[in-house]
Amino acid sequence: MSNRFILASLVTALAVGACGGPEEPQVAPQPTGPTAEELERMRQDSIQRAREEEEARLRAEQERREREAAQRAEAARQTLREPVYFDYDEAALRSDTESRLRAKLEVLRANPGVRLRMEGHADERGTSEYNLALGNERVESVVRFLTGFGLDGGRFSTVSFGEERPAMQGSNETAWAQNRRVEFVITAGSDGIVGQ
Amino acid sequence: MTMPDGGRGVGVCAAVARGSRVAPLLVAAVAAGAAPSAGGAQNAVPGVELGLTYENVYLPPIAILPFRDAGAGRAPAAGVQAIIARDLDYSDRFVVIDSLPEGLADEGVQYELWDQYGADWVLAGHLEEIAGSHYLALELHDIVFTSVERGRFPIPPPGDPDFRMAVHRISDTVVQWVTEEPGIAASRIIFAMAPFGNSTAKEIYVVDFDGEGLRRITWDDNIAISPTWSPDGRRIAYVSYKSGLPRIYELDPVTGNERAFDFGREGQHLTPAYSPDGSELAFTILNEGLFSWDLGDDCCLRQLVEGPANNIQPSWSHDGNRIVFVSDRLGVTTPQVYSVPSRGGEASLVSPYRFGQGGYFADPDWSPRAGQVAFAGGIANRRTLARYHIFVADVGTGDRRLIQLTREGNNEDPSWGPDGRHLVFAGERSDGHGVFVVDSATGRTRRVVAHVRASDTDWSPSLGSGGAGGMR
């Protein structure tokens, strides 16, 4: 507001100055009003302030956009990292597992540079060494699902931990359900990820 | 909830009363094509009918006379005797009598007297010092056939790391004298478990066959699993995730030296198994199949079984001609045990699979002495919590019977001892997890290590002097 006021008075002052003709030099009240140099400096200051204000506004807008893009990217990373879960002694994909994988699929399609490591896990029931095979089978189910939608299998590396790295300690269904899972680690393209 | 005739904490038997032991064994006869009995459907192994039978096993009484010291011997005779008495008890081949009435503990063995007393064997011993070294001189008297076997064995001083193992080797010699079969005393058991205070890691541990000397042998602070002994007992192969992916390493347990196998093929390398002559290492590459590596030339990957199903847990037959393994080619929920020629060929089912009835069989281990294969089997229908028990199938004779060796808790990872008669396994009981040994002939079970959550148990061969016998 104050800038606009100064501009307005400046225009007025210039207009007043332009009205004064050489015929009546003695009439003008000489000691009052800025000199031409002062007026010019005030004009320049005002332009500078306007420019800085505009730049600040653009910067804020840019920052807001970047912040939102970063939030979307982080959401996309979260989507990719979200574990998927399985039923007891099964490697088949549950419906909730499939919807999580579909969400990952969108992110992976939008970000061809992103690579994932998938880690298969089992609960403690069953023999420990066969659980390595079961964890592997769960990972392979996930890979088959994603490559079935046309994604390049070369973007995925896999490892099975069997029952050796539980997400939750305990010998009860709550812990077991948390432990029958595939986890996802972004191994490349995490920084440049684009969210939707 | 203790085992039948549970041997927990059994030292030496104090009485003769344990004469002939009768041990219940579950024998499962395959009902080929026959309908399973309706009553037993709940806990039945698919394709198998379980029937409770009893086998009488005669255990000859052996009396142990008090061992005599050689003057101021450094190896106390009583300590040596206690180790041998317990070893003979744990062999499950005798009833051990070492608490003798006055008059029978005297010098001189009167055969008629011992015959009346009921002893089949009498063991006498004394320590000798010859040129600064100590020896145990043993006499084994055969009371029935009135003959005697004698031997003199070097014994290191009690502080020596090989002391106990040296005494165990003497025990095995006594078993050999009596039964003409190998003993199990001079042996060790390896397994994986979480180290104290770090539940997310797994390390390899070793323990003497009698539960003494438990110690840790890997320090990776990562996941170390599936340890297995080389047939000479001098090396241990195991799987570690320390590189990020599961790979196979070979450890010398005496020096701690270790090397990583480079098979020239990427992937997840699992479940190693040495061939009985030590010339090859069979193992799994996930998603690719079973492979064998030539250890002599350190080269030459050879494919034994092809994917794409999971094919894991190879175990060689005693003669090296066949390999048993686990495959989920019939479905991920029904892993089964198969046998395949080690030079390649058709795989045949070992476990009792019947179409449509599921079943879960894993952890096969081929006996070092005969055509017997032990494995773990899940017993459940789809609605009940699975229970895992140890079974033995005789693949040598074609006798389609399964023997069930455990009846309570959960049990996995069976591994034969050097006598081809005892098995070690990882068990879970109502009072906790542990490492157990079961005698497949008598059914007698004892807890080797209590209150540890062990997995991937593997029993060594007989450990000779030097090598892993003197492992610190």
Image (cartoon, coloured by chain):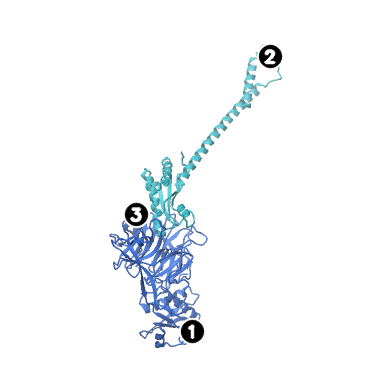
Q: Tell me the SS state at disc 2.
A: loop
Q: Quadrant of residue A20?
A: top right
Report the front residue among A111 and A47: A111
The answer for which chain carries disc 3 is: B
Within 10 angstroms of label 1, few (less than 14), some, or many (20 or more) residues? some
Within 10 angstroms of label 3, few (less than 14), some, or many (20 or more) residues? some
Label annotation for residue B331: 3
The residue at the far top in this view is A23
Kindly identify the amino acid type of the residue bearing the numbered disc 3: Gly
| Residue A127 can be seen, yes or no | yes
Q: Mark 1 = which residue?
A: B70
Within 10 angstroms of label 2, few (less than 14), some, or many (20 or more) residues? few
* Closer to the eye: label 1 or 3: 3
Report the front residue among B418 and B165: B418
Label annotation for residue A25: 2
Kindly identify the amino acid type of the residue bearing the numbered disc 1: Ala
List x then y, in percent, for residue B209: 44, 71
Judging by colour alone, the chain drawn in cyan in this rendered image is A
Same chain for labels 2 and 1? Say yes or no. Answer: no
Give the CA separation, mark 2 to mark 1.
140 Å
List x then y, in percent, for residue B325: 34, 61
Report the front residue among B105 and B79: B105
Give the CA separation, mark 1 to mark 3.
66 Å
Kindly identify the amino acid type of the residue bearing the numbered disc 2: Pro
Report the front residue among B363 and A52: B363
Q: Is residue B82 left or right of residue A41?
A: left
The answer for which chain carries disc 1 is: B
Judging by colour alone, the chain drawn in blue in this rendered image is B
